[in-house]
Amino acid sequence: MSDRAQFRLTLLATGTWQHVFVNEDEAEQLWVYKLPAAFGYVLPFAHPQRFRPAGLSAQVCAALGTRLPCGAKLYAAHLRRTSRQKFARMLVLIEQIKRHGLADIMLPCEVLRDADARLEVAGATFAYRGDILRQRRADYLFEQSENLRSFEWREIVAAHHRLWRCGVTFSTTTAVLELKNWALLDGRLQLFDTSSLTSDPRRVRRVLGEAELDRRERSIARKAVERKTSEPLVELFRFIRRELNRDKLDQLWRADFDFKH
């Protein structure tokens, strides 16, 4: 008899690179279970959350390619392999964060290796064998740039700086200027979306460029105007960019590692 953990999971939500499930055998469902995304397999290939490449030429090539015979099937297979690779790298970084005593930055979680699961999605059932991230469910997820007064802004800056010091960061401007990666649990700001974690400082240097951050600011501000929000976005951007920039990154990157022999 297999000694692998076995789960009966029902789809709760999805992101671009991960599907999120709840365990039907848990009465209170205080935990979520995250797996690599598989659009074209578990969810429809045309799902709006599926990865779309940036840039007009790449988008055109992808659109034309998926219209060819077997094109969508091949592209779905490529995206599934990419999701699995990204998921594996993410789990390594999560374990690195924990080894360095920074587990409090993230929602409580554990990596379940080589697990068996039955996935239930819209009336269909799929078998899954592989790694799963089991993560505590948050009290509140920041869907947009809202409720900015519900936490101390220094918490998000301190979290970034602590991660930089142990050689981990994020690869998107969303993770720098927005709160979509973060959640509240028992009143504390904690990381819930770990999909953009990276150990490559070059990737975050790109998103910390002035032009990139300016573009993200304008995008957030435009959406805020549409929602007629009164959130203190300008003040938050000023605070964040004063503390999260290339100079700070160069100063703090891997500062907690001792290279002395």
Image (spheres, rainbow, N blue to C red):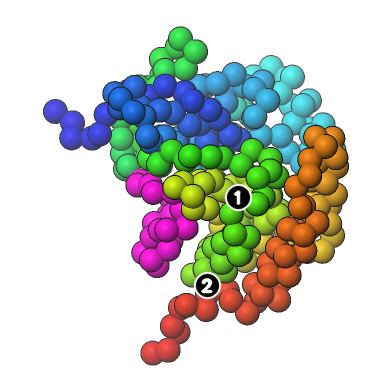
Q: Which range of residues does the magenta coloring cover?
A: 89-111
Q: Are marks 2 and 1 in contact (CB under 8 Å)?
A: no
Point 61% across, 35% down: residue: 16
Task: Decide if residue 102 is on the left or right side of residue 204.
Answer: left
The reply to whether residue 51 is in sight is yes
Q: Which residue is mark 2?
A: 165
Task: Decide if residue 73 is on the left or right side of residue 108.
Answer: right
Q: Position of residue 142 (x, y in %)?
A: 61, 42
Point 51% across, 46% down: residue: 184
Q: Nearer the viewer, mark 2 or mark 1?
A: 1
Q: Is residue 132 above or below residue 168?
A: above
CA gap between label 2 and label 1 equals 26 Å
Q: Which residue is mark 1?
A: 150
Of residues 179 and 131, the one drawn nearer to the viewer in this rendering: 179
Query: Callout 2 environment at 10 Å: few (<14), some (14 to 19), or many (20+)?
Result: some
Q: Is residue 170 magenta?
A: no
Point 35% across, 47% down: residue: 110
Q: Element at badge 1?
A: helix
- Toward the left, the furthest residue is 1
Which quadrant, please, contains the N terminus? top left
Query: Callout 1 environment at 10 Å: few (<14), some (14 to 19), or many (20+)?
Result: few
Q: Earlier in the sequence, mark 2 or mark 1?
A: 1
The reply to whether residue 128 is in sight is no
Tell me the amino acid under the disc marked 1.
Ser
Tell me the amino acid under the disc marked 2.
Arg
In the rendering, which numbered label is found on residue 91? none
Which quadrant, please, contains the C terminus? bottom left
